[in-house]
Image: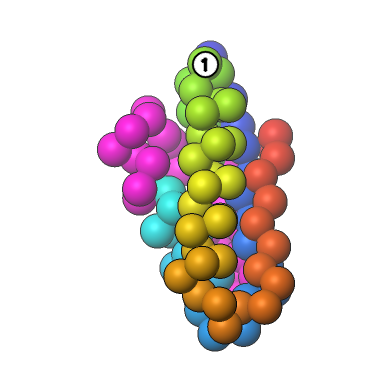
Amino acid sequence: MPFKLRLSVSNLHTNDATAVLARFISSVKAKYSVAVDEMPAGTADMAGATISIPFADRESLRIDYNIFAAEFEVEHPEEENPYFKLESA
């Protein structure tokens, strides 16, 4: 049975939040069986998306999202306090 997750990113000033989420989703599609229920949408500084994954992969995807967020912060120091959130949908 699929497990739904809501991804969001906010507080961006120089990067497009929709593009950031789309990049993450594209990166995990090769690793997991991901269905995009709601495409990344929002504004330049904040966006959200909803995906479904197999229940067994939910914790691994959470780890991947945390790593992605940490790497983003290192790659984009101009973003002072980006906020990445992942929650059950």
Residue sitting at 43 percent across and 58 percent down? 22
Q: Is residue 35 magenta?
A: yes
Residue sitting at 40 percent across and 58 percent down? 23
Question: Can see residue 3?
Answer: yes
Please tell me which residue lies in front, 77 or 28.
77
Please tell me which residue lies in front, 22 or 76.
76
Residue 49, percent across and down?
57, 52
Q: Which segment did they paint magenta?
A: 26-50
32 over 45 or under it: above or below? above
Kind of residue at badge 1: Ala
Residue 55, percent across and down?
55, 18
Report whether 44 appears left or right of 31.
right
82 over 39 or under it: above or below? below
Kind of element beneath mark 1: helix
Please tell me which residue lies in front, 50 or 66.
66
Number of callouts: 1
Q: Is residue 12 magenta?
A: no
Report the residue marked by disc 1: 56
Question: Can see residue 45?
Answer: no
Residue 89, percent across and down?
69, 37
Q: Quadrant of residue 82?
A: bottom right
Residue sitting at 46 percent across and 70 percent down? 75
